[in-house]
Amino acid sequence: MIDGLRHIFHRHPHVSDRRLLASPQTLFGSALVYDQVDDKGDTVRFLSVNGLKESATYLDDRWNELVFDYTKRYNLMFAAGIPLNRVLMIGGGGYSYPKYLISHRGDVTMDVVEMDGAITDLAREFFFLDRLEEEYGVQASGRLNLICDDGRAFAERCAADPGARYDAVLNDSFAAGVPAPSLTTLEAAQAIRGCLVPGGLYLSNVVSSLRGQGSQFLQAQFKTLSRVFRHVHVVPCCAIGMDFMRDNLMVIATDGGYRFPGERPVMPAEDAPVLTDEDNPVRNLIDW
């Protein structure tokens, strides 16, 4: 399961604008790893699948910093003011946020579930996951545990194990721009809630508009999570005044009474569906 970002809507530029490094096959389609100079003059390395950008890293001394704004929204979990010692992330991709979190927060232990071992291999070879492992000694310390598994299956096993609880669960699971359907449902939300400590946080990257026709998936996801968690918050990653444009939204579900900077109200339509394993029209709701 690959981490998704704002640039999933952007097709590749002309081939002369980039330096191709690898073109492997993954579980989700043809992948490309390439370097490209961005509009600030920085060389950035991208991972794309089926023609859609899905992860990125800087190549200089900012190798463990975050390229895209939406990934920085995962730091909203610290705004809750609760201890965050154990974090689960579903969807490794280029491991951009795990690199950031482990290198910037010495008190955090992180488990990352990535379904495709080939993606993790690419992260080691091209996206500095190997450097993180070496410089921070994460294997010896146990601070970063990489798990090759299906995210939903892992969450269900975790929920069934009383000794396996996380302070926060982060979901950034996409396959070539489409969110993993098995993680969007009521049953998935119940499993994820079962993985959390009381008052723990579930943060999910949702690509949708905040308002209008393009917000159908957000409305369905909001309504579905509200059936399981006491509170659901939405924090846009886009600028003010861009409510009708599809972009990354950070959706935070919790039983704790927290507030988050930048959150916006969402009122799902009465006919917005609750997504279930039996009835999950996620692909129709996205309507790419």
Image (cartoon, helix red, strand yellow):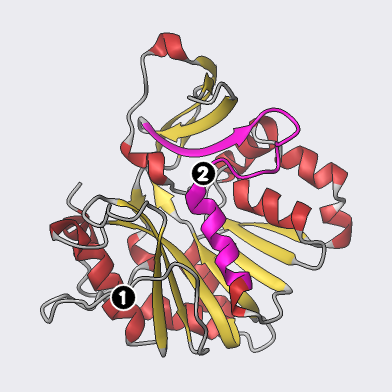
Q: Which residue is mark 2?
A: 68
Q: Amino acid at mark 2?
A: Phe
Residue 281 or residue 200, whichever sits in front: 200
Q: Position of residue 82 (x, y in %)?
A: 67, 82
Which residue bears the numbered disc 1? 265
**Element carrying mark 2:** loop
Q: Residues within 10 Å of mark 2 (few under 14, many from 20)?
A: some
**Between discs 2 and 1, the one toward the N terminus:** 2
Question: Residue, x 45% and y 33% (percent of image)?
Answer: 48
Quadrant of residue 162 in the image? bottom right
View extreme (left): residue = 271
The label nearer to you, 2 versus 1, is: 1
* Residue 146 sits in quarter: bottom right
Image position, residue 89 (x, y; %): 58, 62
Residue at the spot x=30%, y=79% of the render?
224
Q: Secondary structure at mark 1?
A: loop
Q: Residue furthest front?
A: 240
Of the residues shown, which amino acid type is indicated by label 1?
A: Pro
- Estimate the x, y position of residue 269 in percent, counting from the top left: 14, 77
Report the side of 87 relative to 202 (left or right).
right
Residue extent of the magenta highlight: 52-78
